[in-house]
Amino acid sequence: MASLFAILRRAAADLMQPRVLAIMFLPMLLALILWGGLFWGFGTLWVAGLEGVFNDSPLPGWLGPTLAGWVIGMGVTMVLILLLLPAIYVTALFITSLIFMPILLSVVARRHYPELGRQYGGSFLGSLGNSLFALTIYLLVWLLTLPFWLLGPFGAGVAIILNAWLNQRLFLYDALAEHASKEELARLRAEGGWPLYGLAAFLGLLHLVPIINFFAPVYMGLAFTHYALEQLARSRKEATA
């Protein structure tokens, strides 16, 4: 656990590096602009579609027209929030993973692991394929578990576990792609265990904290890079001991 705290501390320090400061808010801002534009263009259709689903349900008959109208309005708002917030979150992670991770990796490797050899076991196409696979699985499982959000703490637990899986799946590949060999990349991803998922779960919670959530994707990228390169350096040291 002390190692994880050290990783989080070093990642926080790296946020102050000029190259990181220049991009710190960009992933979330780009995601907000993208989904804000989509909502501006298609929001009326989305609202109408959700209202149609609610109106076709037994609710109007059970509650009466006045109460049903209020409940449906609240329901549409809640469903839109439950759909848009994860969409913005996932989009910001995707942007960070594909566009900004090379910058974050460069900063961390140069400052903390300058002697760690590069074996280029990953690639941009591998990163893209990994990201698309992770997002597909995430969205499918998220849609299937959406009703659990209505069950309070249990729903929150499902969301934390799912987000932790997505976080480590997205960023660990990118953090190792340049320095690890193909064999090291596969092995370290498979050996993550509870420290990796604990780190991923904690970092996922940062998206729930106002203000911090605007730079959480970049901080997450830094933290996973520290974790990955530290594990790789330790693995190579043990192999040569």
Image (spheres, rainbow, N blue to C red):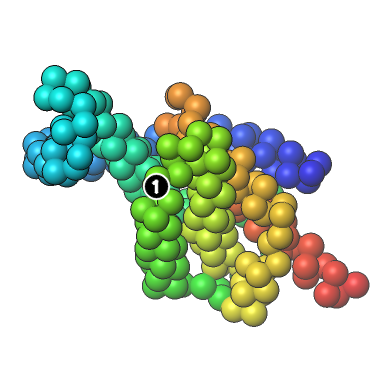
Residue beneath the point at 67% across and 47% down: 198
Residue beneath the point at 19% across and 42% down: 57
Tell me which corner region of the image, top left, top right, bottom left or bottom right, holds residue 147.
Answer: top left
Say left or right for 70 vs 18: left
Q: Nearer the viewer, residue 147 or 2?
A: 147
Residue beneath the point at 16% across and 32% down: 60
Q: Nearer the viewer, residue 179 or 227?
A: 227
Q: Position of residue 80 (x, y in %)?
A: 26, 37
Say left or right for 122 vs 70: right
Say left or right for 1 vs 162: right
Q: Position of residue 94 (x, y in %)?
A: 39, 53
The crowding category of the residue bearing disc 1, from other C-alpha atoms within 10 Å (few below 14, some 14 to 19, many at least 20), is some
Furthest residue toward bottom: 183
Callout 1, which amino acid?
A: Leu
Residue beneath the point at 21% across and 31% down: 62
Decide: is 167 above or below 207.
below
Q: Position of residue 29 (x, y in %)?
A: 32, 36
Query: Considering the image in quadrants, where does the N terminus appear?
Result: top right
Total numbered labels placed on residues in the image: 1
Decide: is 203 above or below 102.
above
Q: Nearer the viewer, residue 181 or 41?
A: 41
Say left or right for 232 vs 215: right
Q: Secondary structure at mark 1?
A: helix
Q: Position of residue 186 (x, y in %)?
A: 62, 74
Query: Considering the image in quadrants, where does the C terminus appear?
Result: bottom right
Residue 231 in view here? yes
* Residue position marked by numbered label 1 in the rendering: 146
